[in-house]
Every structure is written in structure tokens, then in C-alpha cells.
Amino acid sequence: MPIPRSFAFAQLLAGLLAMTVFADEKPSNPDYDASKPHHTPTGFKNNYPFDQPGTGGLLRWQWGRFTKPAIVHALDQIPRAKPDLAYLAGNRQDTTVTWIGHATVLLQLGGLNILTDPIFSTHASPVSFAGPERKVPLPATLAELPRIDVVLVSHNHYDHLDRATIAALNQQADGPPKFIVPLGMDRWFRSEGVHSAQKLDWWQHVTLQGPQGEVVINLVPAQHWSKRNLWGGENTSLWGGFVLEHAGRKLYFAGDTGYSKDFQDIGKHFGSIDFGMIPVGAYEPRWFMHAQHVDPIEAVQIHNDIHAKQSMGIHWGTFELTDEPLEQPIRDLAKAKKQAGLADQDFVLFAIGETRRLFAD
Ligand code: ZN
Ligand code: ZN
């Protein structure tokens, strides 16, 4: 029997109503630089043309979800591991990657503890009690992780920018981490009382001094969008991915993206990537999701475009955001690798909570 998603649908209707009421609002872009094609007077846009299903498409997709039976997830197929917290707390030497779930990854690089798109809440939502729910528990609390030195946030969607998590990080013992964000997101951080957010445009970088030497953090393009308020503010802040450079190695965190020529540009700019973190979830139905979320076939194409030696899948197995079951990326990525002639180890999926040491000889 179909289970109505009445809350989601009511939220959508409220949002559409609010968009109509506040349609006149024209926010200005204080970072506007007319020489940059992805800047607009009111915000930002993607580098390459793409088909974007409009509000009608959003309604059609939501209506489909509303009228169809609930999605059944085989959550027991999503692998889980217990992180070695004592090792992570003591490690300043090894380069490690730990998947916390969704797009939240703990990177230990150059002796720095770096967290990407941190969300430790039960829901990816503006409210703590509703919206997309965490289906697989966190492998560790934020307090159990080592002190975080740097936080990278790719864009302002709720499954990547979580208010409660940012507040907790800002209040961690020994002071807030350094937050690195795309242009325009610094305004949100300041409004939350966070004053250590550094903004970057695409192709800009910041150099950090870690215990094991310099770590360079570059912001790179992605094909996506931004919006946080039901009443407007679409694309008023930028979105992107990050390339982290340390000791001649390059790590890439894609954030949230559709497929575009941007990845060939990233491949040309950096030559090669030692380890990529590329989204492989939240991709169905394709007619609606293709503009903003890659599927595993496109994720493998990104892996090839950026000349990655190895990649891992992120943005899956955690929150129900779209129409495919949470474990489906396991099957679809395996097929995509086979089709593209990739070896199994070229593009891997971690267990939630799993740590892998990179570049270990
Ligand atoms: Zn997003
Ligand atoms: Zn997302």
C-alpha cells in the first residue's frame, strides 16, 4: 500500500508559494566580477550549458514520489565498520581517509585533520525532527573524532551544510577549525557567528601550514546549484569541489555535481589526481537528477577525466534523498566499472566508519 509522503509534499507546496510571494527579491552579489563567466550580478552560474528541469519537473518528480510506494532499502547491504579512534587521535604522520557517511569524510593529510561537508545530525534538513533521515547510524560522534583543524564545505544544501554540526565545530575545545567555503557562503557563516570562514572562487587556493608541511587547498568547479531558503536565494552563493595538495600528492573531493566538461578542465589543470572522492548516489530518476547529480557511470567518467589513480564513492548509503534504494550504488558502480574496463580497486566503496591509509609503501 502506498505510503504518502505528506510532509515532504506540504513542504514543497509551502516552498512554491513562498517563491511566488518573494519572487521580486533580487539579492546582489558582493563578489561579482564581470570578467568571470560564472559570476552574475545576483550570484553564480555553471560553466557549461545543461538541461535543467524547472519547477514543473520538480513537481512531477515529487508527485511521483508522493503517489508511489515508499522506497525499500536493503540497509544490511551497506557495509559498516568501527573506526579505530585511538589511532586516528594519535596519527599526524599517515595520510588517511575515513568515511563518516554521505559526503562527510575525515582526511588526515600533512598532519592536519580535515573534515569535508560535515553532517552529524539525524536529518539532512532545516529542522532536527523531519526531512531526509539518516538511515545508517553514525560510526562515531563528532566529539569522538580528533580535533578538527580544517573544514571544507562544498555548497549550502542541507545534506552538506548542517547548522548544528557547524555550531559544534565552532565550539570545539582549543578553538574553531578553519572553514574553507565557496564565494558567498562566508555570509552564512558570519550570520551564524562563525568568523573563521575563508571564501574561495573557482581556481583560487589557500595554503595552510600543517605539522608535516604545507597543504594547498584549491576550489574547483562543479555543475550544481545552491539554495537554502524556501523563499529565494537560488545560486546566491557558489558551489564547487576541492583539490588538496601535499608533498606532491593530490586528493580531490567533488562535493555534489552533475556531469560536465568541468572535469576535463580539472584533469588538464592538475595533470593527475592520486585519490578522488566522487559522488555515486542520489541519481534517480535520471530525467530529473542528471543536471545536478552524477550516476555511477558518470562518476567513473569523472574518475577518468581527472586522471585519478584511485577513487572512492561518496554521497550514498546514508540519507534517502532520491528514488533509488540506498544500496543500489553498490550494484550500479560495479557494472559501471566493468563497462569502462576499470579494475575493482580503481574505484572503491568504503564501509561507513572505515579508515584506509593512502600511499602506504
Ligand atoms: Zn547539493
Ligand atoms: Zn548532496
Image (cartoon, rainbow, N blue to C red):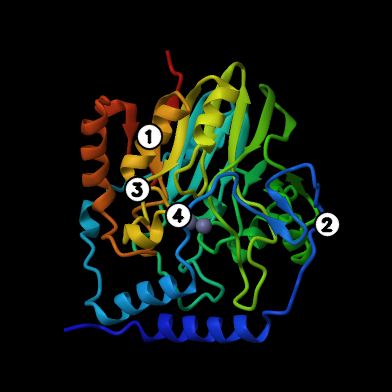
- The mark lying in front, picked from 4 and 2, is 4
Return the disc, 3 or 1, that comes first in the chain's sequence: 3
For label 1, the SS is helix
Residue 93 seen in the figure: no
Q: Is residue 234 left or right of residue 61?
A: right
Residue highlighted by disc 3: 295
Residue 55: % across, % down: 49, 73
Return the disc, 3 or 2, that comes first in the chain's sequence: 2
Label 1 and label 4: CA atoms lie apart by 15 Å
Specify few, some or many for label 2: CA neighbours under 10 Å numbering under 14, 14-19, or 20 or more. few
Residue highlighted by disc 1: 301
Q: Is residue 303 left or right of residue 182?
A: left
Q: Quadrant of the N terminus?
A: bottom left
Return the disc, 1 or 4, that comes first in the chain's sequence: 4
For label 4, the SS is loop
Residue 163 found in image quarter: bottom right
The amino acid sitting under disc 4 is: Ala
- The mark lying in front, picked from 3 and 4, is 4
Specify few, some or many for label 3: CA neighbours under 10 Å numbering under 14, 14-19, or 20 or more. many
Residue 56: % across, % down: 44, 75
Residue highlighted by disc 4: 291
Q: Which is nearer the eye, 281 or 134?
A: 281
The amino acid sitting under disc 2 is: Pro
Q: Quick check: marks 3 and 1 in contact, CB under 8 Å? A: no
For label 2, the SS is loop
| For residue 91, above or below residue 327 | above
Label 3 and label 4: CA atoms lie apart by 11 Å
Q: Which is nearer the eye, 43 or 241?
A: 43
Residue highlighted by disc 2: 30
